[in-house]
Image (spheres, helix red, strand yellow):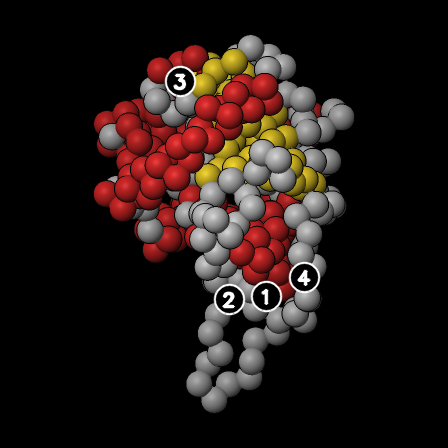
């Protein structure tokens, strides 16, 4: 069950949220949740997220549970953001030699979905209610999460999307923020938002434009076509394709191969980001345009979103 708009607003008012409004001059301090001291473990079990650290490989596993819907519900986003801030608290400013983590790996417990993107059930509810503030709060929180993943929380690590099921819509966008993408054959990739007169507003154009150029970025966003792992690999958006059930083995092969030159691999990622940077301001400006467009969707558009929302529910973990 999605959190209420009131709860989402409370979440966005937290002191650890970059988008929380500043205290107005002479005004009262905004309502915020109390600060919670964090422990130092990397093995955590959130309601919608589970993490496990392997010291011998430097792999930090982050598994999305997708208990209700195979998408980014407000609840899973809250857990993701909290974990990102936990990592920042633990290792901010650490050097490569000081930080025990090498690879942050995003995986999914849903057998047929890595992530089917934004929470369409929440979107349609907010749009029908005219809750622009709630939708914008959700969108800005998504940008916080995606941008922090893109910059690796400013830690000396690399991120991996271990795609063992479909990565659709916002799932595709999230995948684009990772340094390495490993996908199993059978996984599908696509940006279907154009089918209900919307566009993928949480980073798709920004990240695709840097990776494949403006022309192909425009095509991928506007054609609404679902593509296979091999097709997306040919476009340069997936690094390695493996047979079903071999994603973890493929990851471990990559980790072993990269160990002697990890510092070089990480530095080359920094070079790419320096030459073709994506800024947080750019992502926020685009997602605000997305919110404006979404709030004007027609009843027919919302009914199409309802159909895809049911797919998100059917593909949840255990579904």
* Residue at (38% x, 25% y) in the render: 237
Residues 45 and 96: in front is 96
Q: CA distance from mark 4 to mark 1?
A: 15 Å
Q: Is residue 166 left or right of residue 155?
A: right
In space, the residues marked 4 and 2 are separated at their CA atoms by 20 Å
Binning the other alpha carbons within 10 Å of mark 2 as few (below 14), some (14 to 19) or many (20 upward) gives some
Label 1 neighbour load within 10 Å: few <14, some 14-19, many 20+? some
Q: Quadrant of residue 164?
A: top right
Q: CA distance from mark 1 to mark 2?
A: 7 Å
Name the residue at 69% across, 59% down: 39
Label 1: element kind: loop
Tell me the number on the disc at residue 14.
Answer: 1
Q: Is residue 166 visible?
A: no
In the image, residue 153 above or below residue 121:
below
Tag 2 residue: 20
Q: Which residue is mark 3?
A: 233
- The answer to whether residue 244 is seen in the rendering is yes
Q: Is residue 196 above or below residue 139?
A: above
Q: Secondary structure at mark 2?
A: loop
**CB within 8 Å, label 3 to label 2:** no
Distance between the alpha carbons at the discs numbered 4 and 3: 39 Å
Residue depicted at x 68% and y 40%: 52
Q: Which residue is mark 4?
A: 38
Please name whichever residue, 131 or 50, is drawn nearer the observer in this view of the structure: 50
Q: x and y percent of residue 147 in the render? A: 43, 48
Residue positioned most to the bottom: 26
Q: Earlier in the sequence, mark 1 or mark 3?
A: 1
100 or 221: which is nearer to us? Answer: 100
């Amino acid at each position: 069950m999605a959190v209420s708009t009131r709860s989402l607003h409370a979440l966005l008012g937290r002191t650890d949220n970059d988008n929380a409004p500043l205290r107005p001059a002479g005004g009262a301090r905004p309502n915020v949740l109390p600060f919670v001291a964090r422990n130092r473990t990397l093995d955590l079990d959130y309601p919608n997220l589970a993490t496990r650290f392997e010291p011998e490989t430097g792999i930090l596993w982050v598994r999305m549970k997708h208990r209700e819907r195979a998408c980014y519900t407000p609840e899973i986003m809250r857990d993701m953001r909290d974990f990102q801030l936990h990592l920042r608290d633990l290792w901010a400013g650490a050097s490569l030699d000081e930080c025990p983590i090498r690879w942050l790996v995003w995986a999914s417990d849903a057998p047929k979905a890595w992530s089917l993107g934004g929470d369409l059930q929440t979107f349609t509810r907010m749009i029908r209610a005219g809750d622009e503030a709630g939708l914008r709060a959700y969108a800005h929180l998504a940008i916080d999460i995606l941008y922090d993943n893109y910059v690796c929380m400013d830690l000396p690590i690399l991120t991996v999307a271990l795609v063992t099921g479909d990565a659709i819509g916002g799932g595709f966008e999230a995948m684009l923020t990772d340094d390495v993408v490993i996908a199993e054959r059978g996984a599908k990739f696509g940006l279907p938002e154009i089918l209900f007169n919307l566009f993928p507003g949480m980073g798709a154009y920004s990240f695709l434009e840097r990776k494949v150029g403006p022309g192909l970025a425009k095509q991928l966003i506007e054609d609404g076509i679902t593509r296979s792992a091999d097709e997306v690999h040919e476009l340069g958006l997936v690094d390695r394709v493996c047979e079903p059930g071999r994603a973890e083995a493929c990851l471990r092969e990559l980790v072993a191969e990269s160990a002697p030159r990890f510092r070089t691999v990480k530095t080359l990622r920094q070079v790419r980001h320096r030459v073709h940077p994506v800024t947080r301001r750019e992502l926020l400006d685009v997602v605000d345009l997305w919110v404006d467009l979404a709030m004007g969707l027609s009843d027919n558009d919302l009914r199409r979103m309802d159909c895809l929302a049911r797919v998100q529910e059917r593909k949840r973990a255990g579904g």
